[in-house]
C-alpha cells in the first residue's frame, strides 16, 4: 500500500507541475558576460573566440521558469538531462561566490533538479513542464545533482538551497541507490532496450549499484558501471555531509555513509582486472560473475575522469595504469587521425573522437605539454562556428555530430580557466578514508 501511495503522490506532483503555467524568459549573467568579453589571448584569436563562445553557451541554453526554477536544455534536443545540466552550469560555480545573480540562477537550477528526482528517479531527462523525456536509468543521473548542490554550498557557503523540497528529491536518490544494490530482488525497473525482456543481463550482488544505461545513454553490457560507481562514492560522501551538517538527520547520513563504503568495497573487489603490459586497471563494466568490459567511453563519468570527479588521485598507480591503457590503441574506442586523437563512443560513428574526452584528457594531464597538445587538437577541431560538437572525424572536423551541444563547451571553458588561467579547481569530497588500491 505504501508503494502505491508514494507512486500516486509522485504522479499528482508531476501533474500539478505540468499543469502550472511555465512561462520562460531568457537569461543574462553580467559577471559571466563580462568575463567572456574581457578574455584576451593575442597569440590565439581562435582560442579567444572559442573560450568566449563556450563560457556563454550555458546561459544561452538556460531559461527562468515562472515557478522560480531554471531549466537548462542540452542543446539541439529540447530536454534537460540531469547529467548534462549539472555539468553545463559547473563553470558558473567559479563566479558564484561573489555574484548574487549567479547564485540565484544556480539555486533555481538545483531546485528544479530536486523536483525532477521526485517525479521519477529512474528518468534521465525531462521537459520544461516536468514530463519525463527519457526513462533510461543511469546511476550518474542521481549522483550529478548531489554533487552540484554540495559544490555550490562549499563554494558559496549558501545553505539556503537545502529546502524541504530538495530533501525529498535527495531522499528519492538515496532510496533508489539502495534499492538498486540488489536489482534482481528489489527492483521492478525494465526498459525495452535492455536484454532479457528489459531486465538486463544477470548480475551478482557486489555491494555496488546497478545501472541500466551508460552516460552515453547506451545500454550497459554488464550492469555495474565502474565510472558511475566511482561518482556514486563521491556523491554519497557529499550527501552524508549534507544530511549530517545541514538537515541534521543522522540516520540518513549513516545510510549514505554505509552505502558509500559498500560501493567502494565492490569497486575494489570486482572492478579491477589485471592486463598484461599494464598491470591492474579499472574495468569499464562488470557483473560480479567474472565478466568485464575493458574500454572507456567519452561521456562522463568515465574511467579517464576518475580524478576529476574526485574518486582517485592523478598519481594513483591503478589510475595511471588505466589511463595508459585508455589512451592507447588497445582501448577499442581510442581513435587517431591527422587532426586529433582521442576517445570516442559507441554512441556515434566508429573512428570519431569526442571533444568531451579530449577536454577530460587535458583536465587529468600531469604535464603542461600534454595539456597544450590537447588544447591544440581542440582548437584544430573548430570548423568556424567556434563551438565544440558531440563527435567529429579526426581527419576532417567539418564532419561532426550535433551542431548545438552544451556540455563539451562548458567543460572546455573550465579547462581553459583551470589549466591556463590559474583558476583553482572546484572542491570535491575527500575519499582518503577509503581503501583504494594504489593510493
Image (cartoon, rainbow, N blue to C red):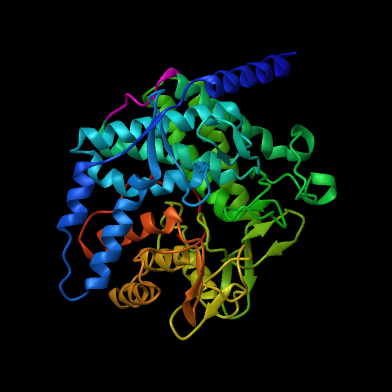
Q: Residue at x 56, y 50 (%)?
A: 228
Q: Residue at x 41, y 25 (%)?
A: 244
Q: Can you give x and y, in whole percent of width and height, for residue 187 in the image? A: 74, 34
Tell me if 360 is positioned left or right of 322 in this view.
Answer: left
In the foreground, 57 or 3: 57
Location of residue 108 by image quarter: top left
Q: Is residue 227 above or below residue 104?
A: below
The reply to whether residue 433 is in sight is: no
In the foreground, 259 or 131: 131
Q: Can you give x and y, in whole percent of width and height, for residue 134 in the image? A: 63, 42
Q: Which residues are magenta?
A: 158-164
Q: Residue at x 23, y 34 (%)?
A: 101
Q: Can you give x and y, in whole percent of width and height, for residue 43 in the image? A: 18, 76
Give the prevailing secondary structure in the magenta stretch: loop
Q: Residue at x 54, y 39 (%)?
A: 142
Q: Can you give x and y, in whole percent of width and height, for residue 100 in the image? A: 21, 32
The reply to whether residue 144 is in sight is: yes
Q: Is residue 154 above or below residue 285?
A: above
Identity of the residue furthest to the bottom in this view: 338
Magenta stretch encompasses residue 69: no
Amino acid at each position: 500500500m505504501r508503494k502505491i501511495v508514494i507512486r500516486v503522490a509522485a504522479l499528482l506532483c508531476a501533474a500539478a507541475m505540468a499543469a502550472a503555467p511555465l512561462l520562460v524568459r531568457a537569461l543574462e549573467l553580467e559577471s559571466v558576460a563580462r568575463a567572456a568579453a574581457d578574455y584576451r589571448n593575442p597569440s590565439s584569436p581562435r582560442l579567444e573566440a572559442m573560450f568566449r563562445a563556450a563560457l556563454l553557451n550555458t546561459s544561452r541554453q538556460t531559461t527562468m521558469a515562472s515557478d522560480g526554477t531554471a531549466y537548462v536544455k542540452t542543446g539541439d534536443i529540447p530536454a534537460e538531462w540531469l547529467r548534462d545540466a549539472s555539468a553545463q552550469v559547473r563553470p558558473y560555480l567559479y563566479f558564484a561566490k561573489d555574484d548574487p545573480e549567479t547564485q540565484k540562477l544556480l539555486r533555481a537550477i538545483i531546485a528544479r533538479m530536486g523536483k525532477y528526482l521526485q517525479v521519477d528517479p529512474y528518468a534521465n531527462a525531462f521537459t520544461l513542464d516536468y514530463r519525463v523525456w527519457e526513462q533510461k536509468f543511469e546511476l550518474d543521473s542521481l549522483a550529478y545533482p548531489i554533487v552540484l548542490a554540495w559544490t555550490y554550498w562549499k563554494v558559496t557557503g549558501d545553505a539556503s538551497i537545502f529546502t524541504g523540497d530538495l530533501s525529498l528529491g535527495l531522499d528519492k536518490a538515496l532510496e533508489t541507490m539502495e534499492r538498486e544494490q540488489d536489482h534482481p530482488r528489489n527492483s521492478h525497473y525494465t526498459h525495452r532496450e535492455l536484454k532479457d525482456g528489459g531486465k538486463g543481463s544477470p548480475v551478482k550482488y557486489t555491494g555496488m549499484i546497478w545501472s541500466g544505461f551508460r552516460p552515453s545513454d547506451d545500454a550497459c553490457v554488464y550492469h555495474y558501471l565502474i565510472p558511475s560507481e566511482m561518482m556514486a562514492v563521491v556523491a554519497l560522501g557529499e550527501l552524508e555531509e549534507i544530511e549530517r551538517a545541514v538537515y541534521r538527520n543522522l540516520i540518513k547520513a549513516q545510510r549514505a555513509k554505509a552505502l558509500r563504503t559498500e560501493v567502494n568495497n565492490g569497486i575494489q573487489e570486482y572492478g579491477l582486472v589485471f592486463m598484461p603490459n599494464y598491470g591492474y586497471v579499472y574495468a569499464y563494466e562488470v557483473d560480479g560473475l567474472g565478466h568485464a568490459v575493458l574500454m572507456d567511453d567519452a561521456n562522463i563519468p568515465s574511467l579517464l575522469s576518475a580524478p576529476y570527479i574526485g574518486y582517485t588521485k592523478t598519481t594513483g598507480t591503478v589510475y595511471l595504469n588505466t589511463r595508459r591503457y585508455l589512451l592507447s590503441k588497445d582501448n577499442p574506442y581510442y581513435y587517431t587521425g591527422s587532426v586529433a586523437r582521442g576517445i570516442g563512443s559507441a554512441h556515434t560513428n566508429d573512428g570519431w573522437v569526442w571533444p568531451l574526452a579530449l577536454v577530460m584528457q587535458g583536465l587529468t594531464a600531469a604535464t603542461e605539454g600534454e595539456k597544450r597538445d590537447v588544447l591544440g587538437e581542440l582548437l584544430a577541431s573548430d570548423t568556424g562556428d567556434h563551438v565544440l560538437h558531440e563527435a567529429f572525424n579526426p581527419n576532417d572536423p567539418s564532419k561532426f555530430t550535433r551542431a548545438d551541444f552544451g556540455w563539451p563547451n562548458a567543460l572546455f571553458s573550465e579547462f581553459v580557466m583551470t589549466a591556463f588561467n590559474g583558476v583553482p579547481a572546484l572542491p570535491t569530497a575527500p575519499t582518503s578514508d577509503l581503501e583504494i588500491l594504489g593510493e
